[in-house]
Amino acid sequence: MDNENNFTEENDLKQESESNDNLLKTSKFKKNKLIIILSVVALVLVLAGGGVYAIINSNPKMKVFNALKATSEELKSKETLTEKIAGKDYLKSLEEKGINQNMKFTINSTNLKELAQLNGIGISIDSSLDKKNKKIMLNIGGEYKGTSIAKAQLYTDNKKIMLSVPELYNAWFTCDAENIQNQYNNSLFGKNGKLPNQEISLKAFGSDGDETLDKEFYNNIITGYLKANAEKLAIIGKNAKVEKSKQTKSIEIGGVTQECDGYDVVISGEDSKNFILGIYDYILQDEKIKKVITEQVRYSYMQQRKKYSSPEAMVDDMYAELKKAREEFGSKVIFDDVNAKIYIDKKDRAVSIEFNTAIDSGNGKKVEVKYSNEFKGKDNVGDLIDMSMELGSNGEKVKIDLDNSNITKDDIINEEMKLVLSSNKDQFNINVKSNYNIKNGDFDGSADLSAQGQGITLSCNGNAKFDKTSKKLALDFDKIDFNANANSQKVNISLDGSYSMAPLEKAIEEPTGEMLEVFNLSQDKLVTIAQEMQNNAIKIASAFM
């Protein structure tokens, strides 16, 4: 459950919570999906979390705990494709030092008449990001058949935003990053209609000293939850029944099929419910979590379905809904016992988890839950992951199947992820795969999404190189194809391009030149600027006619 012991956090939990939400929107489970999904996710945590078993000393329980911990360590040691190319700490170092990214793409062909005139159009984006000093600089350029059309620059230091389009008007237009609505309403623009009296901020980062919703913060939440619920987890651990099973399971590990010993785990329905109630209570009571969420909402605050007077009001409403859900969960939801089986291989790693239970969401309708997950592979127990979960009630079924593989053979790294979400009538498929040649850097990849006879496919190929001296990772795309089939209409767009990222070579500096506070401009100045921009736009357009 913490960083050391939770081996499902980056695999099962993320994929289940996101995928289930999308699928259940089309099913009759929609009304109770939040309770069911939270329950299933928490059950996985109960079974996989080392915090539950850490205080147990009996042999079967310690055997299971140690096996889960061993699997957790192997899964954490897995490298992403970027890490395999540039090193395990590459992305972390970029975040610490700042990152420069450069991308350039050109449209080569398309079957859409509406886009035919765009053939030969290219766009380039050069971005510099320094999170530590809260600065961003973007340079955006447009080209047509190799000739520059226009350029735009955007700068922010989290206090102000500056925009320049020199081909149209050679000056920087500036405004404060916060309280956009007040600046607008008090300017000439507000005379034609004022913005709602709601805070609109365009800050890219939190304020000094504020935490952000990053991986470190999530890990701190998990650690905090474990401390706050230590007694409750201890009770669950003591009450859990763990016995060695007579059943074994044949699983291919390291290229060899072996019989893995099974262990039966039973967690009472009441303990499972109490575990989930602990999650609700911790989130509702921890002011630090609420503060971070509020700050994040503040810097990206926009109008939602409901009308809110401020970001704080929106977060208060979110918490009111969460509190209501907690009360309904506590008073109505009933759990059956969780019956699980965990299989352990010859190296004392948990290589398979299975469990089933049932949850009555409070309306007399019981949802049966079946879950299984296998970790296989030659070099790592996570090289091959097969996960399946099924929710069923009164003949209705929602099923999730995930197959994920990461295999290296003959200097080729093959990665593939297949995800199938299905209900009684509907099915949604995602298939993502890639191949990378370790020696020469050639790669190709594709992503397919399909549902109900419609689909989208994105494919690419090219070469990847990493310069150890400059720490620059560069991708050169020979071809990028986008194909879609929706409502009997086929769309094809073909591009080429490049992408690179490297540490910042020098600090981001605030631009210099003429500065115009856009919301303080007089009417005469606005008219002059508009006329000059129009004339320059006509000159640029005429050059391509």
Image (cartoon, rainbow, N blue to C red):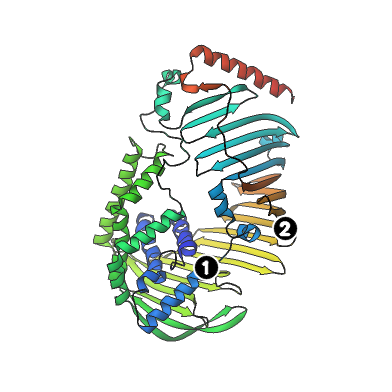
Classify residue 247 by image quadrant: bottom left
Which residue is painted at 36% across and 56% down in the image?
34
Whether residue 217 is visible to the viewer of this picture, yes or no, is yes
Amino acid carrying label 2: it is Gly
Disc 2 secondary structure class? loop
Which residue is painted at 46% across and 22% down in the image?
519
Answer with mark 2 or mark 1, whichever residue precedes in sequence: 1
Classify residue 20 by image quadrant: bottom left
Q: Is residue 319 above or below residue 424?
A: above
Residue 156 is situated, as x and y percent measured from the top left of the image, at 51, 34
Query: Which residue position is annotated with label 2?
Result: 441
Disc 1 secondary structure class? helix
Tell me: 272 left or right of 388: left
Tell me: 93 left or right of 287: right
Extreme residue toward the bottom, this view: 246
Q: State the quadrant of the C terminus.
A: top right
Extreme residue toward the left, this view: 331
Q: State the quadrant of the N terminus.
A: bottom left
Whether residue 269 is visible to the viewer of this picture, yes or no, is no
Q: Nearer the viewer, residue 312 or 439?
A: 439
Amino acid carrying label 1: it is Leu
Q: Nearer the viewer, residue 451 or 529?
A: 529
Which residue is painted at 36% across and 74% down in the image?
53
Residue 455 is situated, as x and y percent measured from the top left of the image, at 60, 52
- In space, the residues marked 2 and 1 are separated at their CA atoms by 25 Å
Query: Which residue position is annotated with label 1?
Result: 75
Residue 23 is situated, as x and y percent measured from the top left of the image, at 46, 56
